[in-house]
Amino acid sequence: MITLETDKLVFRFPEIRKDATTAIHFQRTLRIPDNGNEYPLPPGLGEFPLRHVEDFAGRVPADWRERCGVMMPLFQAEAMWISFGAPWWWADDAYPCAIKIAAGKINAISGKPWKPELEASERDYVVVPDQPWLDGFCVAKDVIRQFVAMPLGSGYSVEEQITGKAEHGGLQIIVYPMKNDRYEMILQERREREQARSAQRAYLRGAIQYAAAGSSMGLAAGGRMKQQIYADPHGLDAWDQTVSSRCFVTLVDALQWREITGEAPPTAPPTAADYTKAGLPWFDYYAADLETLPGAKNLALVKSVAEIAAETGDQVLGGDGKVDPVNVISLKRSKARNVPARPVREGRAS
């Protein structure tokens, strides 16, 4: 079951276990420069608003209604990242889940066409709570290219570059819970660690929150960012693939958000240069004890928004300015929290 709770998607699997729950948030952020440099993690600037597609059935195209799910607004060339768990922190004791993420039905980890099943050979999914977030397409070991929104049909999206078609857009998500018997083994290991651990724990908050006929959008590749994508430490057999929940997230041009929902879209985020000039922090998360994935070869070949714009002469990006992050904070883990719920319709499988 999926519910929409204060702008996050909550996936619950009560048939597996009462506490078999995980959450996914979509965070606004700075668009990092696409200049060949690799940047640390930019901050979260607040969650994107999410709305049930069915609530606006009379104002959206038929294919949106058929897919159901939720929708959210992005400006052209706006960046985003996906957070797993609570919006600014995640719990060590969160229920483990395997999650596949695709953009325009192109897997963001493997670069392969969408398949709902987990593929151990392709290592095409992430595992939470080990993977706290995903900022973009996995193009190399410990490097991603940032998720950047562009109008579907403009030729910039990863979907269009790999398939040659502007067909789906949006985000596709499917979540599988861990088998209950495997989780019981993990709980026992945790209890043993707790008995040997000192009572004192230090927690560090993971990001900073600031006051915070539709046109489909797709996700294109932006600048390069340092980010580890962790391999599955449990193995394919740990996941119950007889139970899953999936959701289509339609990306809406922010300029049409008011026309569809009657609500004002979020304001445009600051530039990375303005943010850095103000002395505000960037972030780093590194886990030396976890194996990381090498990156997908076909995603590494995808051109970024800046590269395509340079070839075509399009003026789709503003100037990046000087961005030299010096205030970089190392992140730790802390506790998660729960909030009230409303079911999300999953729509027709395709």
Image: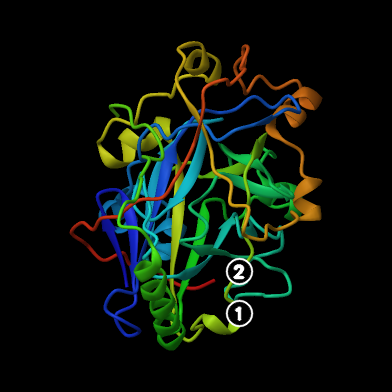
Compared with 36, 183 (above or below) is: below
| Residue 208 image point, x, y percent | 37, 32
Compared with 73, 161 (above or below) is: below
Location of residue 347 (image quadrant): bottom left
Whether residue 315 sits left or right of residue 49 in the image: it is right
User: Which of the pair 341/250 is nearer the observer?
Assistant: 341
Q: Residues within 10 Å of mark 2 (few under 14, many from 20)?
A: many
| Residue 336 image point, x, y percent | 30, 55
Where's the N terminus, which quadrant? bottom left
Look at 25% across and 36% down and name the residue there. Answer: 262
Instruction: Look at the image and tell me whether residue 24 can be seen.
Output: yes
User: Which of the pair 247/315 is nearer the observer?
Assistant: 247
| Residue 165 image point, x, y percent | 70, 52
Q: Amino acid at mark 2?
A: Asp
Q: Residues within 10 Å of mark 1 (few under 14, many from 20)?
A: some
Secondary structure found at label 1? helix
Look at 42% across and 46% down and name the residue there. Answer: 26
Compared with 304, 134 (above or below) is: below
Which residue carries the number 2 mark?
Answer: 232
In three-dimensional space, the C-alpha distance between marks 2 and 1, rounded to whole angstroms, equals: 8 Å
Mark number displayed over residue 24: none
Which residue carries the number 1 mark?
Answer: 236
Label 2–label 1 contact, CB within 8 A:
yes
